[in-house]
Amino acid sequence: MRASAGDRDPLEDILGEMARVAQRGAGRATAEGDPDPGELIEGTEEVSFVLMAPGHSRLDIDVKAEDDRLRVESYDFKIVKLLRCVVDPSTAKTTYVNGVLSVRVAKRV
């Protein structure tokens, strides 16, 4: 039996989105400039980046926010995301939980 739209579990929606990101190859980007590694989300005050990177520890992943780009590197991938805005690198915050890397950085005003 299929649930109606009002009965949907928000966790199912999140897991479905994570699966779609993973299917696009987000977890194993191997070259600078890959067409779509991870998910870049630009808000009004900050930029967020989410990457499926299972099999790593948080110490394996190096994240650097620069003025107009975000660099994410590990032993098996390197990702450089060009941003459409300038960010404040000192505000960068990262988390790595259950194979999902999240980066948030404030836009520079």
Image (cartoon, rainbow, N blue to C red):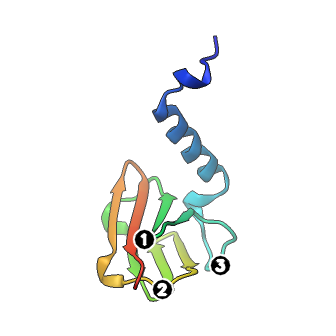
Residue at 33% across, 60% down: 95
Mark 2 residue element: loop
Q: Between marks 3 and 1, how big is the CA–CA gap?
A: 22 Å
Q: Which residue is mark 1?
A: 46
Residue at 66% across, 73% down: 34
Nearer to me, 42 or 29: 42
Residue type at numbered disc 3: Gly
Mark 1 residue element: strand
Q: Quadrant of the C terminus?
A: bottom left
Q: Which residue is mark 2?
A: 86
Is residue 75 placed above or below 6 in the rendered structure?
below
Q: Whole-percent x and y of residue 3?
A: 60, 18
In the image, is 11 to the left or to the right of 26? left
Residue at 41% across, 61% down: 102
Q: Which residue is mark 3?
A: 33
Q: Residues within 10 Å of mark 3 (few under 14, many from 20)?
A: few
